[in-house]
Image: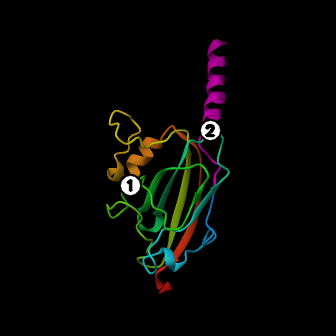
């Protein structure tokens, strides 16, 4: 009987624990709608600035937001990683911050979106975190991201276990939009 109770508890508790970090955030942009073409202004064909992003439906207890933009059709090429954003969820176009890491070109900051060939799908993924990740000047803090040496893999590792919610929108870009 005791074994049956333990087994039943496992099948009830484990699925409930999976709710931490559900897809609850709503990610939008005033510049384009999900699954629509990204304006050239935000790409390698235009002003090369980051697009405006809005994150809504942020869960209670959120201490910071992080965003990853990646090109799913270019091997998840990283266009931008940014963390320790405030919880108001408004990131204006051309946003600059000290809390950015390396893009797919191994350079700090925003790498404008480009379509090498055909249509590319850029995923704008936002995360609500229960911590602030960047604690500069304290190499003993496990949330120190080491600034520009932080890449997408390292950021994702640091966020693990701290994601209260996430969401994404997808923007497209076609090479022949020139």
Name the secondary structure under disc 2: loop
Placement of 115 over or under 26, stated as above or below: below
Residue drawn at 42 percent across, 47 percent down: 155
The image quarter in which residue 112 lies: bottom left
Residue 10 highlighted magenta (yes or no): yes
Name the secondary structure under disc 1: loop
Placement of 4 over or under 168, stated as above or below: above
- Residue 79: % across, % down: 43, 64
- Is residue 76 shown to the viewer in this render? no
Quadrant where the image shows the N terminus: top right
- Residue 164: % across, % down: 59, 42
In the image shown, does 135 or 176 lie closer to the viewer? 135
Residue drawn at 60 percent across, 31 percent down: 14
Residues in magenta?
1-26
The image quarter in which residue 144 lies: top left
Residue 11 highlighted magenta (yes or no): yes
Prevailing secondary structure of the magenta residues: helix
Mark 2 and mark 1: span between their CA atoms? 25 Å
Residue drawn at 51 percent across, 39 percent down: 131
Disc on res. 101: 1
In the image shown, does 175 or 31 lie closer to the viewer? 31
- Is residue 39 shown to the viewer in this render? yes
Q: Say which residue label 2 marks.
A: 61
In the image shown, does 28 or 13 lie closer to the viewer? 28
């Amino acid at each position: 009987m005791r074994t049956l109770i333990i087994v039943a508890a496992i099948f009830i508790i484990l699925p409930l624990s999976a709710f931490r970090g559900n897809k609850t955030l709503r990610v939008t942009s005033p510049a384009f709608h999900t699954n629509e073409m990204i304006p050239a202004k935000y790409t390698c064909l235009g002003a090369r600035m980051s697009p405006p992003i809005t994150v809504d439906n942020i869960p209670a207890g959120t201490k910071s937001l992080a965003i990853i933009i990646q090109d799913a059709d270019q091997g998840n090429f990283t266009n931008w990683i940014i963390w320790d954003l405030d919880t108001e969820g408004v990131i204006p176009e051309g946003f600059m911050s000290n809390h950015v890491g390396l893009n797919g070109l191994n350079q700090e900051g925003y790498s404008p979106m480009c379509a090498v060939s055909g249509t590319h799908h850029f995923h704008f993924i936002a995360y609500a975190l229960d911590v602030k990740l960047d604690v500069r000047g304290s190499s003993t803090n496990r949330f120190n991201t080491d600034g520009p040496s932080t890449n997408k893999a390292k950021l994702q590792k640091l966020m693990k276990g701290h994601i209260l919610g996430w969401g994404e929108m997808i923007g497209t870009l076609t090479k022949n939009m020139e």
